[in-house]
Image (tube, grey):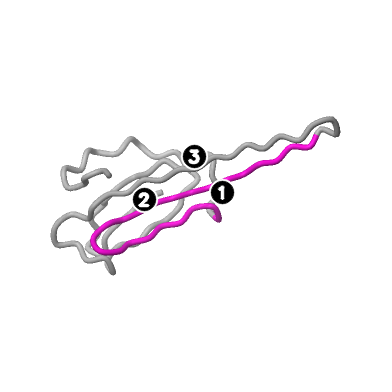
Amino acid sequence: MMLNSCSGQNLALIDVKGFDPRDITVTVKDGKVTVSAERKVECNTGLSKTSNYKKFVKEFCLPPGVCDKEVTYSVESKCLPPPKCCPYLCPY
């Protein structure tokens, strides 16, 4: 998943491998971006029932001067090069 501002500035590249795009939620509020994803897989073998639950949450601050409304995102299924470090991001 790539997050961008409308000025064309790349803000983050987030690996959400293993999640369906429908399982991913992005919220932008008060200068913070939160990316979350949840997935539950149940397997019934007839003798037993198992559940596998996977959750991902990443939150960071927007760089100075970037408005909440400027942030867009897209989910890509292709391999992308590793991201360059962005000094404006502060992980929570």
- Where 15 falls versus 1 (above or below)? above
Q: CA distance from mark 3 to mark 2?
A: 13 Å
Q: Answer with mark 1 or mark 2, whichever residue precedes in sequence.
A: 2
In the current view of this chain or complex, which residue is farthest to the left? Answer: 64
- Answer left or right for 48 relative to 92: right
Q: Secondary structure at mark 3?
A: loop
- Residue 43 in magenta stretch: yes
Q: Give x and y (percent) for residue 19.
A: 54, 44
For label 3, count other residues whose C-alpha is less than 10 Å away and answer few (under 14), some (14-19) or many (20+): few
Q: Quadrant of the C terminus?
A: top left
Residue 49 lies in what quarter of the image? Answer: top right
Q: CA distance from mark 1 to mark 2?
A: 15 Å
Circle 3: residue type: Lys
Observer-nearest residue: 1 or 23? Answer: 23
Instruction: List the residue tagged with mark 3.
Output: 17
Of labels 3 and 2, earlier in sequence is 2
Dot 1 amino acid type? Asp
Q: Which residue is mark 1?
A: 20
Instruction: Give amino acid for label 2.
Output: Met
Assign a secondary structure to mark 2: strand
Name the image quarter holding residue 41.
top right
In the displayed structure, 91 sits above or below 69; it is: above
Residue placed farthest to the right in the image?
A: 46
Coordinates of residue 6 in the picture (x, y in percent): 26, 64
Residue topped by disc 2: 2
Circle on res. 64: none
Q: Position of residue 77 (x, y in %)?
A: 50, 45
Residue beneath the point at 24% across and 38% down: 84
Q: Is residue 88 left or right of residue 73?
A: left
Q: CA–CA distance between discs 1 and 3?
A: 8 Å
Which range of residues does the magenta coloring cover? 22-44
In the image, is residue 4 part of the stretch drawn in magenta?
no
